[in-house]
């Protein structure tokens, strides 16, 4: 029994030591990832069981304010990193040892705190979020639901995309609002599939055309067919691929970009209908104006004829007011 306890302690000691190391950096300036799209510098705000919270620095802090406004709206200053994918984290001991005299709102910034990364996802429901800071699987949109091991994200191009939480590297709250793009009008939320977990979601998408992964060499499209033993098959023309749902980062129904094309076509058809109704209204108004002109022309012609006849009658029966007789006398 003692040997078993020692084995369990030794097996869990690397994770515990790594977790305690991260907790010792809370409040310090660190850099998450050495490079790449997920790399950020900032102050470490919180450390939980399987994620960390970073108050990222503004990269355009010393640039013109107008350029800051043109910065990508989908990036937020609070970033939550999943510890499982965290490749490296470093601190600048020189800058951390120096006293700070500038005003910093890191101590007063608001951030979500949850027991796990899955529980953290529920704070983003009905909010605009940025999934991953970069790369082919990076997407921004509204989080519609969090169920089991996946989230449903409403995106602009592909509609509802279902992300496997296990493969999400980071998430941050986005300042970009979808209704601003629509001129402040409310947009309709399409129907989406609800399932217990990511594996059950694949079962409900069976015999449908799906798109797996947004980009990269592992991105595929085709008809999803349920297999035996938890594996699935993608059929696309002559190609048959057998996949394991656990290694799929995200999935969506329909070809890529089909949601945006459908919206554009619907908007185009609605605009054409509006133009047709406006043209019909204009033609009706023109016809009514022509009828008015015709009727007014008839009335004016009758008035002119009566006035001319009355003037002629007045000329015939003109009264003589006074007559003068001139008598010529010879000289």
Image (cartoon, rainbow, N blue to C red):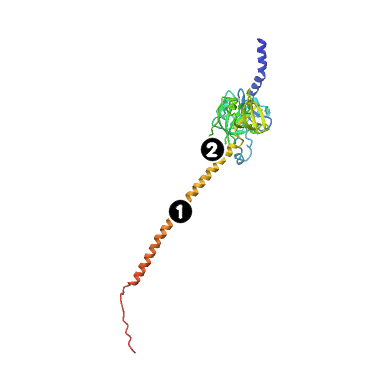
Q: Position of residue 216 (x, y in %)?
A: 67, 33
> Local crowd at mark 2 within 10 Å, few (<14), some, or many (≥20)?
few
Q: Is residue 312 left or right of residue 4?
A: left
The quarter holding residue 44 reads: top right
Viewport quadrant of the N terminus? top right
- Identify the residue position indicated by label 1 in the image: 287
Q: Where residue 223 sits in the image (x, y, percent)?
A: 62, 31
Residue at left offset 46%, top offset 51%: 284
Q: Residue furthest top?
A: 1
Q: Position of residue 224 (x, y in %)?
A: 62, 29
Q: Is residue 179 above or below residue 165?
A: below
Give the secondary structure at mark 2.
Answer: helix
Can you tell which quarter of the image residue 153 is in? top right
- Name which residue lies at 52% across and 43% down: 270
Q: Please tell me which residue lies in front, 32 or 45.
A: 32
Examine the rendered structure and indicate whether residue 19 appears above or below residue 128.
above
Residue on which disc 2 sits: 179
Circle 1 — which element?
A: helix
Whole-percent x, y for residue 228 in the image: 63, 23
């Amino acid at each position: 029994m003692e040997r078993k306890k020692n084995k369990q302690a030794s097996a869990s000691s690397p994770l515990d030591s790594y977790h305690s190391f991260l907790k010792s950096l809370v409040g310090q300036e660190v850099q998450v990832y050495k490079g790449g799209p997920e790399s950020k510098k900032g102050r470490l705000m919180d450390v939980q069981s399987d994620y960390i919270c970073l108050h990222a620095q503004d990269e355009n802090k010393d640039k013109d304010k107008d350029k800051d406004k043109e910065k990508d709206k989908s990036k937020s200053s609070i970033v939550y990193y999943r510890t499982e994918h965290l490749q490296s984290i470093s601190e600048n001991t020189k800058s951390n040892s120096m006293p700070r005299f500038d005003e910093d709102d890191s101590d007063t910034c608001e951030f979500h705190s949850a027991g796990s990364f899955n529980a953290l996802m529920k704070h983003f429901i009905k909010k605009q979020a940025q999934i991953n800071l970069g790369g082919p699987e990076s997407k921004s949109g509204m989080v519609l639901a969090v169920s089991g091991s996946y989230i449903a994200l409403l995106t602009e191009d592909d509609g509802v995309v279902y992300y496997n939480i296990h493969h999400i590297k980071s998430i941050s709250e986005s300042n970009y609002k979808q209704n601003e793009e629509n001129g402040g009008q409310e947009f309709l939320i399409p129907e989406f599939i609800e399932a217990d977990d990511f594996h059950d979601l694949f079962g409900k998408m069976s015999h449908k055309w799906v798109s797996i992964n947004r980009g990269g060499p592992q991105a595929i499209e085709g008809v999803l067919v349920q297999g035996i033993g938890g594996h699935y098959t993608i059929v696309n023309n002559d190609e048959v691929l057998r996949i394991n749902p656990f290694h799929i980062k995200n999935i969506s129904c329909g070809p890529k970009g089909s949601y945006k094309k459908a919206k554009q076509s619907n908007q185009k058809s609605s605009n054409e209908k509006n133009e047709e109704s406006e043209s019909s209204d204009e033609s009706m108004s023109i016809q009514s104006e022509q009828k008015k002109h015709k009727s007014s022309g008839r009335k004016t012609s009758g008035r002119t004829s009566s006035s001319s006849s009355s003037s002629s009658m007045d000329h015939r029966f003109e009264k003589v007011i006074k007559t003068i007789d001139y008598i010529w006398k010879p000289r």
